[in-house]
Amino acid sequence: MEAIEQAIRNALAKADAVNPAIRQKIYESAWGAHERSLAANGALDDEQREDRRERLKAAITRIEDEVQATGSITPPPPPTPVAERREPTLSRDAVEPRTSTARVEPSLNVAPPPEIDAPEAISNEPAAADNYRPERLRPRLKRKAERKKARGLTKFLIILAMLAAALGVLWLVASGIINSKPSSIPPSTSNPAASSSHEPIKEGELAPGGNWIKIFDPSDMTQVALTGRATATIAGDQLEKYVRIQSPAEADVISFTVGQGVLEQLAEKKAVFDIVAKTEDGTSTQIAVSCDFGNLGDCGRKRFDITDASKEYLVQTQFPADKKPAAAGVIKINSDVSQSGKSVDIISIRVQVAN
């Protein structure tokens, strides 16, 4: 497990460790490689597999705490060379012969038990380090030692292969050859032209990529304002955080600020606002989204059906060609059009200029 933690630290040290999306990609890649190695190792039972998963979770949490606390990642020290383990051996030549002047310990001159179907023999030869067992046991002990060495070598080779595979996957992800998709923010697959629909935009209708401008992130609650009895609280874990909003009534809305600098970049252009959201497990609701951009107008009122799967919900806006923003704007969200008080988790809000 220390090797996998070192691999994660190396990957974060080579990548942009302060970017939560990149960190999540690396964590998910490490988790996937670990799961494949557990599946390939048939010698582990369920309890051992769960123990290794918990240890990997603890390692990821420890790394994430370090990044959030210091803003950087400490790369692991280079691995120390592992000396090859040598089995101790006893040689007849290593036994020094006794001289007449050495102190002689008292001993019992008992001959070893005779082999089956062999005549008994009495020998006055002193016991040496390599003949303290009956001769018939030596082949069996030799075979057992060889099997033990072979099993140890096989385990070492398997662990080495799994470590090499995990490091290879992490290197591919860190170098950008493999684009791993985080579960919390899937790639944009929506079409601005269908923004009036109650469903998220269909896959393939919006080209992936683009220069996205961040409007809201759960780490900065200064961009959130509440009206009436609406509430907004930070929730989630170290790997994914979100703000849980709740609107008991139609007039209770949560507003997310769109800075004046962002509106200046969007002025006289067509823009697509991307809201990444989900509900609590096993629930669903319908939200209402509206905008107020001051002298640049609004985006109308849109409704979207939200489920417990994290998805993107897009709102398209054409800004007037002859106006500049005089102040910041807002995006307003009511978490439950039916007014039954259901909550919605807002993971992020961003915007880009539509082609």
Image (cartoon, helix red, strand yellow):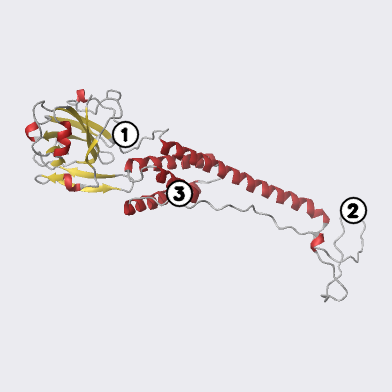
Q: Is residue 241 above or below residue 106?
A: above
Q: Check disc 3 and report the residue beneath it.
A: 5
Q: Check disc 1 and report the residue beneath it.
A: 186
Residue 132 seen in render? no
Q: Position of residue 108 (x, y in %)?
A: 84, 71
Amino acid carrying label 1: it is: Pro
Left or right of residue 291: residue 123: right
Q: Would you identify the image quadrant in which residue 11 lies? A: top left
Q: CA distance from mark 1 to mark 3?
A: 26 Å
Sequence-wise, which precedes: disc 2 or disc 1?
Answer: 2
Q: Check disc 2 and report the residue beneath it.
A: 117
Q: Nearer the viewer, residue 273 or 307?
A: 273
Residue at figure coordinates x 92%, y 61% from the top left: 121
Other-residue count near label 2 (Cα within 10 Å), few / some / many at <14 / 14–19 / ≥20:
few
Amino acid carrying label 2: it is: Asp
Q: CA distance from mark 3 to mark 2?
A: 61 Å
Mark drawn on residue 30:
none
